[in-house]
Amino acid sequence: MWRSIRQLPSSSVRTICIQTLPYSSFLSFSSPIPKPQSSSFAPTKTLPFASTSSFSTIILWTFNGRGGGNASGSIASRCISSFPTPQPEMMVDWNDAVSCSEVGHGGEDNDVDDRTLEEETKRSIPVRAFFFSTSVDLRGLVEQNKQNFIPPTSRMTNYVVLKFGNLASSPGPGAFISGSDCCFMVVFQYGSIVLFNVREHEVDDYLKIVEKHASGLLPEMRKDEYEVREKPTLNTWMQGGLDYIMLQFLNIDGIRIIGSVLGQSIALDYYVRQVDGMVAEFTDINRGMEKTGTFTMESKKLFQIVGKANSNLADVILKLGLFERSDIAWKDAKYAQIWEFLRDEFELTQRFASLDFKLKFVEHNIHFLQEILQNRKSDFLEWLIIVLISVEIVISLYDLIKRSF
């Protein structure tokens, strides 16, 4: 294949036409075209080109055919009309390959991609969820932070939203949380705290605000992290990804929806670990019974485990409201989409099913051990009755013998 090409700015190309001609057709060139001898004929030839300001035409031609003087074939001729801009004279080899940088503007595309990536990074909002107590006095918290309190828009009363930073601005179309000094804190009555747009070194300061009104502090705080990205040019309202969710913008209702799911998730993780501890304890008891044929557990300890299992299940269902759909999600399908995506992302339904299965295992073991303890108590009472009857018989015999003498 022969190829003759000249470097042209992409903006100067006006028309491109392609025509297939037989060998016998005449093409106008400054020099006659050599007759092809074979399909592999490709002599190397270098042509000089000089830029001019007048109209110029470049023809790209290719020989296809087999050897022989009368062999049939064709010439693919490409005519490129252009108005080139003045450029330095350059030499192009007939067989030189053409790189993308010679005919395109890849550098500009890369710059656009870098700017887009940088813009998306700036629009990232870190979300951090914490669980360090089993109860929070929301009324006292709001009383001491009235200037930061955002009034609720639904009937849900088990959480409050506090805003810090620029209190005059309101998130919504045209106003973005990412890149601003505004941060939000969602506090739940059952002990979860979700922070939006709070830097890592500022987390302890916000947690101390809630700690004053918390009770039942845990020895170990649970923590989880997530990410919200704002992209106003997004074609859809939301788009989910791995460990992040992308929205056109994040407003107060979005903060409430995302905060509610993350708060339930981090609290559910705590209760799952509590039940895992009970399962491990019963597993050790069963292994001991397998070796010795008996177990040594007081009824008081067993009743404590029963109370702990029942309270955990009640907290998950009643306090967390795990099966209650958010009022905001009921009213607006956009937020229902976020709510459903996040519940699937954090696998709340599957995790509760696993928790329920473990609680049933604990319940089964509790019933089994209760029956054993009850049988032990019955056996003790029976032996006590036997001893009392025996003592009474002995006393009666003693009286009879004494009277006979």
Image (cartoon, rainbow, N blue to C red):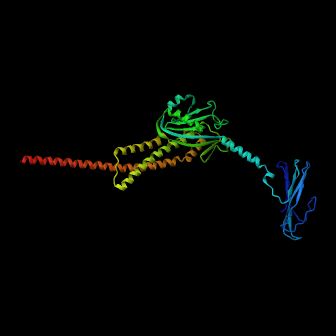
In this picture, residue 77 sits left or right of residue 382: right
Percent position (x, y) of residue 309?
A: 42, 45
Q: Quadrant of residue 94?
A: bottom right
**Relative to 153, residue 369 above or below:** below
- How many numbered marks have been drawn onto this rendered protein structure? 0
Q: From the viewer's perspective, is residue 371 above or below residue 176? A: below
Q: Residue furthest left?
A: 405
Q: State left or right for residue 207 relative to residue 80.
A: left
Q: Residue at x 62, y 34 (%)?
A: 182
- Say if residue 314 shows up in the picture: yes
Q: Quadrant of residue 300?
A: top left
| Residue 218, x across and y down, in percent | 47, 39
Q: Is residue 226 left or right of residue 71?
A: left
Q: Position of residue 65 (x, y in %)?
A: 84, 67
Q: Position of residue 346 (x, y in %)?
A: 55, 46
Q: Quadrant of residue 67?
A: bottom right
Question: Is residue 330 visible from the viewing direction of this image?
Answer: no
- Give the quarter of the figure containing the N terminus: bottom right
Q: Residue furthest front?
A: 201
Nearest the camera: 384 or 218? 218
Viewer-closest of 211 and 340: 211
Query: Residue 78, relative to residue 141: is it above or below?
Result: below
